[in-house]
Amino acid sequence: MPKTSLLVVAPLFGFLSLAGCGDTSPSLDDPANNTIGAATDRATALAMACSGCHAAQSDAVVSLDEYGADALRDALRRYKTESDGTTVMHRLARGYSDEDVDLLATYFDTEGVEP
Amino acid sequence: MIGLDRRSLLKGLGLGAAALTLPFQAFARSKANIVVIGGGFGGASAARTLATLLPSASVTLVDANPVYTACPFSNLVLGTDRPLSAQQFGYDSLQRLGVTVVTALATDIDPVAQTVTLQGAEDLTYDRLILSPGIDMRWNALEGYDEAAAELLPHAWKAGPQTTLLRQQLDALEDGDNVIMSVPTAPFRCPPGPYERASLIAHYLKTRKPRSKLIVLDAKDSFSKMALFQEAWSEHYPDHLEWRGASDDGTVARVDAVGRALETDFETFYAPVINVIPPQKTGFIADRAGVSDATGWCPIDPLAFESTLQDNIHVIGDATIAAPMPKSAFSANLQAKICALGVARLVSGLSPEPTVLANTCYSFTTPDEAISIAGVYSNENNALKSISGAGGVSPLAADKTIRAQEAAQARSWFETITSGAFG
Ligand SMILES: Cc1cc2nc3c(=O)[nH]c(=O)nc-3n(C[C@H](O)[C@H](O)[C@H](O)COP(=O)(O)OP(=O)(O)OC[C@H]3O[C@@H](n4cnc5c(N)ncnc54)[C@H](O)[C@@H]3O)c2cc1C
């Protein structure tokens, strides 16, 4: 159960953000648009900055695809809080809230989502 | 189910060929007709993201050329043995994703009728138009520097034949003769780009024409990653690179292309090889669409990069007024993806949501060492703003291994960003 809950959390965020603008969006009743809402939610948008560098594994940059939510959350929190860190990841991680770090960690977690 | 959808989006954005066979049918069935003009880092990424998010929509990508030549890493073509072919990318993978690719110059846009005029191809209509035309030079804004002058004194600020011309001129240079570069005031494409180029031309001279030297005439007194570049220059190129800022008479006032001379207020500099990086503006098609303003660039609402001047038109990449985000390939690629998410929401009756954007730019100071600058930005409340406490540059006086690591990260970034855009 702890493993699958990582997969359930992210869709919830997607629907929460949809609920926020539901009043102004008549076509939300259309299930197709609920899907678009989830496929374009905050986690997806945040992750787009990461995929500029982290799509595939290389000898210099890790792939986030197989990282695992806990390990990724820990790594990002460490980058964020190590005040003397100077790597690109330290400089970037300082711009993200803890909530957004959690969203990203969950987003990139792939356990159980292989088709 | 939704996890699967998001995964297929991630995969579709350049994470492997297997991704293309993943099920897209769960996505919205919007039949929207979306046209993207400009198949560079911005436009190609926007078309890819939209085709993945909206498989039932019509996505058309227009570029004047069938093959795109990338600017990032083109300074390595000038200064090392990197071939220009390593900079070139086609649009086959976008076509396989269902994007209609049209090779034609867009010559006009009617933002009221929502039509695009193409040279030598049928006109297009659109529900939503995304412009990523990059830059054009402001010919004659620097007196004496026009299109004809650029054939003698290349800018090489759009990669391709101009890059080859500048390299040929360097190869023909006699050892002992000098090279001059002219750099404009901001804003221009790739703020650290001129200084990376200066480093790699200096490397070329040091290794192949050791009695020659590069003189950089700059219209500014400070520039991106300045302390880091100057540290590298004094270490690696004390005899091969001289930089003059504006208060040291560095501002070039006039170009004499035929005489191969640059004039500042007080001096005239002659050299057989002169690289003029001229003042720039948005690609002309943005002017035709009525989305550029008096600055020569395009104001946008950064939530979905919608033009603030015309309805149903979005502008991304170098063409935009997006400061503090720099005019970089990283920015263009990310703006494209955020714009595409926003367009997918808009055509599905949802409004775009604010998010956090970022940029990372690496610059080579030698073929094996690089330095970096990073920034993190919010796009809330109609403005891009740097998130304070985040971002910044590589440490000064760092160990060689850090510079080598950032060079390796840069090479990895180039692979990822080009496969993200072009497949
Ligand atoms: C020397 C140099 C080094 C650089 N290094 C880096 C780097 O290391 N990292 C980085 O992030 N950025 C770098 N950049 C910046 C980067 O190249 C640009 O920011 C990026 O290309 C912007 O993408 P874009 O989509 O806005 O424009 P472009 O990539 O220029 O794409 C515009 C496309 O639109 C097409 N087009 C324009 N008008 C029309 C029309 N009317 N009809 C049809 N097609 C049209 C053009 O043919 C072109 O293919 C560098 C730039 C230079 C010059």
Image (spheres, coloured by chain):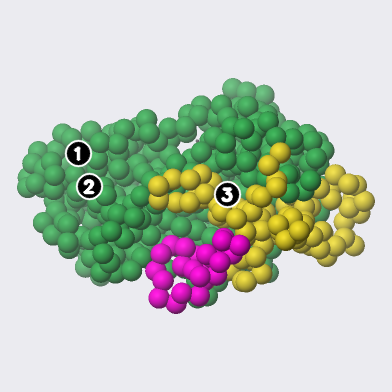
Residue at numbered disc 1:
B170
Question: In the rendered structure, the residue with mark 2 lies on which chain?
Answer: B
Mark 2 CB in 8 Å range of ligand 1? no
Callout 3 crowding tier (Cα within 10 Å): few <14, some 14–19, many ≥20 = few
Q: Tags 1 and 2 in contact by the CB under 8 Å rule?
A: yes
Q: Residue at x 40, y 57 (%)?
A: B191
* Residue mark closest to the camera, 3 vs 1: 3
Numbered range of the magenta stretch: A70-93
Can you give x and y, in whole percent of width and height, for residue B190 in the image?
A: 41, 53
Q: Position of residue B243 (x, y in %)?
A: 21, 61
- Left or right, A113 with respect to B337, comes to right
- Number of other residues with Cα within 10 Å of mark 2, as a class: few under 14, some 14 to 19, many 20 or more: many
Q: Amino acid at mark 1?
A: Leu
Q: Which residue is mark 2?
A: B201
Which chain shows up in yellow? A
- Work out how far the residue at label 1 is from the one at label 2, CA to CA, in angstroms: 9 Å
The amino acid type found where label 2 is placed reads Ile
Q: The chain coloured green carries which letter?
A: B
- Label 1: element kind: helix
Picture quarter containing residue A13?
A: bottom right
